[in-house]
């Protein structure tokens, strides 16, 4: 029998493989008409096989990154409550918005791939949500085997909220235009000075916001229509690498205004694909909290 420290990576690998298998089984519900084709057959890569490969790749990539960067497999599985947005939490709640955003963006990217592979809008949205949930849940299960983290139901709820929000946007074009979930990032002092090297946890350089484009809500004024109403949140100084750059921890909920970058790009004749990228990203300097 393996000691706990040796068994944990194997248990983790089995759990993640089970998650991937469950998701690919759901995706396989659409009959695969490829018969006995081989890899060398031109039509071997049916949309179903592409979907299965995508989800296996998600789990493989997450697992490799987690073992390399987040010390997965270094402890037995454990679960703990992290709280939400309190001052005394590990990151002031910034990690919860990071989880939600990751779920939303993964759902968006995966659904785009499914549409490209021939799935209709409803199927692509549903399968995209499954892939988004697979990635974020894999991360959370892996965290359960990390000595620095542990499985957190608060994180998992945030994961599901992000996936759910993006699924609703994909299924309702009107709300997709009216509500956008964006991330603004400018490297923190710790990142700029080489103390931090993981952009995914550089919370002191991040803000997340819900953007409500005024044009989509019926504002016809030619000037006001180029702005968004923003509701956002960010924190500063929570990571140990931040402490030499901040006197104390800070939490910054805000309401503000921002430039509607997708609309500006449309005026400049940018491609729809480029415009869509900025439904998820806020350029630093284009969002102004009120009061500043």
Image: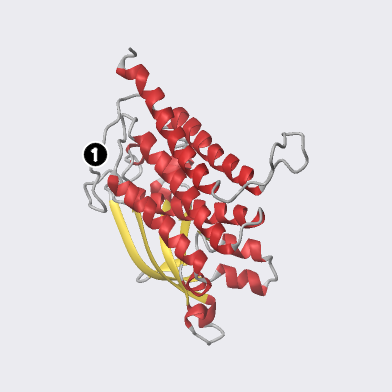
- Residue 151's place in the image compared with 47, above or below, is above
* Quadrant hosting residue 264: bottom right
Image quadrant containing the C terminus: bottom left
Residue for point 49% across, 84% down: 218
- Residue 27's place in the image compared with 193, above or below, is below
Residue for point 41% across, 56% down: 162
Residue for point 47% across, 72% down: 175
Q: Nearer the viewer, residue 248 or 66?
A: 66
Residue holding disc 1:
80
Residue for point 66% across, 56% down: 118
Helix, strand or loop at mark 1:
loop
Residue 228, given in percent of the width and then of the height, sits at: 47, 73
Q: Is residue 119 visible?
A: yes
Residue 203, given in percent of the width and then of the height, sits at: 39, 47
Q: Left or right of 77: which side holds 31? A: right
Residue 123, given in percent of the width and then of the height, sits at: 55, 58
The extreme bottom residue here reads 221
Q: Nearer the viewer, residue 188 or 31?
A: 31
Residue 199, given in percent of the width and then of the height, sits at: 47, 43
Q: Nearer the viewer, residue 262 or 112?
A: 112
User: Crowding near pointer 1: few (<14 within 10 Å), some, many (20+)?
Assistant: few
């Amino acid at each position: 029998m393996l000691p706990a420290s040796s068994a944990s990576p194997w248990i983790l690998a089995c759990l993640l493989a089970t998650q991937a298998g469950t998701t690919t089984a759901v995706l396989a519900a659409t009959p695969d008409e490829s018969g006995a084709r081989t890899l060398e057959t031109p039509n071997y890569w049916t949309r179903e096989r592409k979907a299965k490969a995508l989800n296996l790749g998600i789990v493989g990539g997450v697992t490799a990154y987690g073992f390399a960067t987040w010390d997965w497999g270094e402890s037995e599985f454990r679960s703990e409550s992290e709280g939400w947005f309190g001052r005394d939490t590990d990151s002031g709640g910034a990690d919860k918005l990071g989880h939600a955003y990751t779920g939303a963006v993964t759902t968006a990217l995966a659904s785009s791939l499914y549409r490209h592979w021939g799935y209709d809008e409803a199927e692509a949205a549903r399968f995209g949500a499954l892939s988004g949930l697979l990635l974020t849940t894999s991360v959370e299960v892996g965290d359960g085997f990390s000595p620095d983290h542990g499985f957190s139901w608060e994180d998992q709820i945030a994961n599901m909220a992000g996936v759910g929000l993006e699924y609703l946007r994909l299924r309702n074009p009107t709300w997709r235009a009216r509500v956008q979930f964006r991330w603004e990032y400018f490297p923190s002092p710790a990142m700029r000075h080489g103390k931090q090297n993981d952009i995914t946890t550089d919370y002191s350089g991040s803000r997340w916001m819900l953007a409500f484009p005024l044009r989509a809500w019926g504002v016809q004024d030619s000037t006001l229509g180029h702005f968004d109403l923003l509701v956002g949140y960010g924190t500063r100084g929570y990571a140990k690498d931040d402490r030499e750059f901040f006197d104390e921890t800070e939490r910054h909920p805000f309401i503000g205004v921002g430039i509607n970058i997708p609309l500006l790009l449309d005026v400049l004749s940018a491609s729809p694909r480029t415009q869509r990228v900025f439904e998820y990203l806020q350029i630093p300097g284009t969002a102004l909290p009120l009061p500043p």
